[in-house]
Image: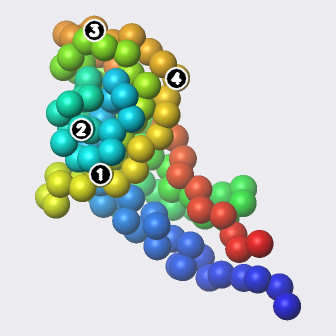
């Protein structure tokens, strides 16, 4: 018998991630909300829950596309190596990914390109 899942089931992780209200460029991989939003934070931008995370079919399942953000002020100098999604209301770290290593200087701005989170179909 073949394996199958309704898209609504595969969207469940996306339903969690798309409630993130801040995206943060970090100088190291955060493992907690505090590390993402304070300890390793270099630049952050407000995200709109649901709106900045459209869902669609992906190449191997379902995906959410995290919206791009331009001219985000850099608050602290350092080298960005990770991007974190957090939800301020309940202080949760929701998702972390790597990014192309980039030196950031306080007072400048940084652009976050759009990127995707994909949940695969059952195999």
CA–CA distance in space, label 4 to label 3: 16 Å
Answer left or right for 15 relative to 87: right
* Circle 4: element type: strand
Please provide percent x and percent y for residue 37. Answer: 21, 38
Residue 20 percent location from the top left of the image: 30, 54
> Between disc 3 and disc 1, whose residue precedes?
1
Q: Earlier in the sequence, mark 1 or mark 2?
A: 2
Where is residue 41, by image quadrant? top left
**Residues packed near mark 2 inside 10 Å, few (<14), some (14 to 19) or many (20 plus):** some
* First reached walking from the N terminus: tag 4 or tag 3: 4
Q: Which residue is mark 4?
A: 100
Q: Which residue is mark 2?
A: 35
Q: Which residue lies at the image location 51% right of the left edge and 71% below the top edge?
A: 11
The residue tagged 3 is 105
Would residue 74 be found to the left or right of residue 120 on screen?
left
Residue for badge 1: 93
């Amino acid at each position: 018998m073949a394996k199958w899942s309704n898209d609504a089931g595969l969207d469940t992780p996306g339903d969690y991630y798309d409630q993130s209200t801040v995206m943060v460029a970090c100088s190291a991989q955060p493992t907690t909300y505090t590390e993402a939003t304070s300890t390793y934070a270099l630049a952050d931008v407000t995200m709109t829950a649901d709106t900045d995370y459209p869902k669609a079919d992906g190449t191997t399942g379902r995906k959410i596309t995290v919206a791009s953000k331009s001219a985000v002020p850099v608050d602290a100098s350092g080298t960005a190596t990770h991007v974190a999604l957090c939800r301020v209301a309940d202080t949760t770290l929701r998702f972390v990914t790597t990014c192309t290593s980039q030196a950031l200087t306080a007072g400048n701005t940084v652009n976050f390109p759009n990127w995707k989170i994909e949940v695969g179909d059952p195999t």
